[in-house]
Image: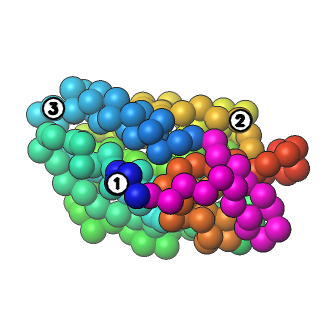
Amino acid sequence: MTPSLKIPTRVEIKGDEFVPYLSVDQIQSRISILAGEINNDMNDKSPIFICVLNGAFMFFADLIRQVTIDCEVDFLKLSSYGESKISSGQVQMVKDLNCEVEGRNIVLVEDIVDTGFSIEFMKNWIEKKNPASLKIVTLLHKPASTKIAHKLDYVGFEIPPQFVVGFGLDYAQKARNLPAIYILAGNGSSENE
Ligand code: PRP
């Protein structure tokens, strides 16, 4: 991270105000710790790290450059939120994997686990392809929003059930470029996302 990054003190999207929640330093420190754990645990497993587009792209890029073990990367794309802040529960595969999953150690990398619908969909999708193992990494987890619980192997931060944007996470496709994570201000829409 360069010292010249612009870190806004508030962000307005579609009339909603967001305020700083997790700083660049907090995020990057946590990513270093997660990468260290993965390097220890997955050494000699030659895993394939799968970035779940779009939201995980920034977390994935920062995590993977701190992974020092032999590995490969691939990308898949899901969609469930559309333009809304609330999950539709209807998860769709928009882009499938290009790699052979059978017999490989797979590490799914998510930006956020909220209801758990997306993880449920991807676990089913990947397990049908007979991987040797499947681990899940997520930068953010909202335990209070869980509708389908899953074992999450590596979690960056547990957060309250409020809408967050930045560091890859969007609201109506906006704000993914923010280098830090922002949370919806006030008590509006606490049921969001
Ligand atoms: C977001 C996020 C996760 C999912 C988590 O994706 O990136 O994949 O929602 O929510 P869930 O646990 O309630 O399923 P989204 O469908 O918004 O697409 P995006 O990654 O392109 O923003």
Q: Is mark 1 within 8 Å of ligand 1?
A: no
What is the C-alpha distance between the residues marked 1 and 3? Answer: 30 Å
Q: Quadrant of residue 70?
A: top left
Residue occupying the point 85% across, 45% down: 186
Rate crowding at label 1 as few (under 14), some (14 to 19) or many (20 or more) other CA atoms within 10 Å. few
Q: Earlier in the sequence, mark 2 or mark 1?
A: 1
Q: CA distance from mark 2 to mark 3?
A: 33 Å
Residue hosting label 1: 2
Residue type indicated by callout 3: Asn
For this view, does 7 lie left or right of residue 20? left
Camera-nearest residue between 112 and 186 = 186
Circles 2, 3 touching at the beta carbon (< 8 Å):
no
Task: Please identify, in this view, whether the residue under mark 2 or under mark 1 is nearer the observer.
Answer: 1
Which of discs 1 and 3 lies nearer the camera? The answer is 1
In the image, is residue 151 part of the stretch drawn in magenta?
A: no
Pointer 3 residue:
43
How far is disc 2 from disc 1 in space, using C-alphas? 29 Å
Q: Position of residue 57 (x, y in %)?
A: 41, 60
- Identify the residue at horizontal 73%, vertical 67% (top origin): 13
Q: Any mark on residue 160, and which?
A: 2
Quadrant in the picture for residue 95: bottom left
Range covered by the magenta-colored residues: 5-21
Determine if residue 60 is in view: no
Q: From the top left corner, tell me how far across and down residue 129 is, in percent.
A: 33, 54
